[in-house]
Amino acid sequence: MSCENMLELMKKALLIPATENYADDEISLHIASCRQLLVTAGVPREIAESDSNPLVKALITIYVKTNYGWKSSGEVKELPKSFDVLLRQLCLHRPEVGGGSSS
């Protein structure tokens, strides 16, 4: 797991220059909190801690943007709904179980 890589991605998503480190601790806390939320929701830990899974990247980005200073912006209005949809998709996707379906 490359926490610094995810930190860099989140800083870019928040439009914070990579050279600035004033928010690194808070952003890192949000990243770790999101990963724990994913595990608690039923996502296998190895997937939740992956930096290469596009759904994990998207979920962490939404979580960080929602919880880090974007509350007054109208553009975060739909983020929690998007988070829920992607989380359900990630929880339903079980690569180790082939061909299952849910109802």
Image (cartoon, rainbow, N blue to C red):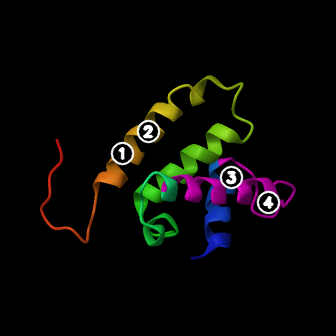
Residue range corresponding to the magenta coloring = 14-38
Q: Label 1: few (<14), some or many (≥20) within 10 Å?
A: some
| Residues at discs 2 and 1 in contact (Cβ within 8 Å) | yes
Pick the residue in front: 101 or 28.
101
Identified at 43% across, 38% down, the residue is 84
Disc on res. 88: 1
Disc on res. 84: 2
Q: Give the quadrant of the N terminus.
A: bottom right
Q: Secondary structure at mark 4?
A: helix
Pick the residue in front: 19 or 79.
79
- Give x and y (percent) for residue 78: 50, 28
Residue farthest to the left, as pictured: 99
Disc on res. 34: none
- Give x and y (percent) for residue 50: 49, 70
Q: Secondary structure at mark 3?
A: helix
Disc on res. 30: 3
Asked which quadrant contains residue 62, the reply is top right
Q: Give the quadrant of the C terminus.
A: top left
What is the CA distance from the residue labelled 2 to the residue labelled 4?
26 Å
Amino acid carrying label 2: it is: Asp
| Residues at discs 3 and 1 in contact (Cβ within 8 Å) | no
